Amino acid sequence: MIVQQGKVISILFSLRADQDNKLIASRQHKPLEFLVGKKKLILGLDKELIGLSIGDTKKVKIPPEKGYGLRDESRVRSLQRSQISDHIELHQGMTLKRKMKSGTIVTGIVKSFDEEQVVVDFNHPLAGETLNFETEIIDIRDATAEETQDGYKEPSE
């Protein structure tokens, strides 16, 4: 069996960011399982695994456009300190969640702050990064009807 659209595959992987060769994710002991083609994984990686078989390994370089996108400086916002709950003790690098008027919740990283302003970057932390994956295909199988509908299967304990 080979990796193709509509198959559930299990992979082990490590991920490094190109910019500083920083290790983002090390090779796990528990494989990542997903349905190929359901956009539940980085699109560029998903496509690169098509055609592989169990036991195959592949190094994949994903440019920002096919990974987490390019950085968008308009997503770095200066918020009034009063917009953030008083009970939150701010520190640089912390993650904040904000509910938009549409109801969508966005996550951002605190870049700086003072008594009046908080600068938050709402870009994905890996936006603008070229991603370097080392992958190994552990399993390939047909998807169940539920997986085809949902796009993934919850890992079993």
Image: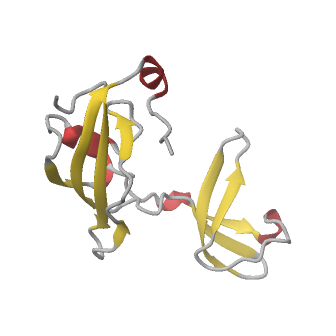
On the rendered structure, is 18 left or right of 35? left
Q: Compare residues 28 and 77 and report the one nearer the observer.
A: 28
Name which quarter of the figure residue 21 lies in.
bottom left
Give the colour scheme of this rendering: secondary structure
Q: Position of residue 109 (x, y in %)?
A: 58, 67
Residue pushed farthest top? Answer: 145
Horizontal and vertical percent position of residue 4: 22, 29
> In the picture provided, is 37 more to the left or to the right than 105?
left
Res. 44 in view: no
* Image point (29%, 53%), residue name: 12
Residue beneath the point at 26% across and 34% down = 140
Q: Residue furthest bottom?
A: 114
User: Which residue is at a point 50% across and 38% down the rendered structure image?
Assistant: 154
Residue located 61% across and 56% down the image: 107
State which quadrant residue 120 falls in: bottom right
Q: Point out residue 55 in the picture as x, y percentages from the top left corner.
A: 16, 46
Q: Quadrant of residue 126?
A: bottom left
Looking at this view, is 45 or 152 the one in front? 152
148 vs 43: above or below:
above
| Residue 69 sits above or below residue 141 on the image | below
- Up the image or down, 6 lies above or below 55; here it is above
| Nearer to us in this view, 33 or 73 | 33
User: Can the viewer see residue 57?
Assistant: yes
| Residue at the extreme front | 157
Q: Is residue 21 left or right of residue 41?
A: left
Q: Quadrant of the N terminus?
A: top left
Q: How many marks?
A: 0
Residue 83: percent from left, percent from top: 80, 63
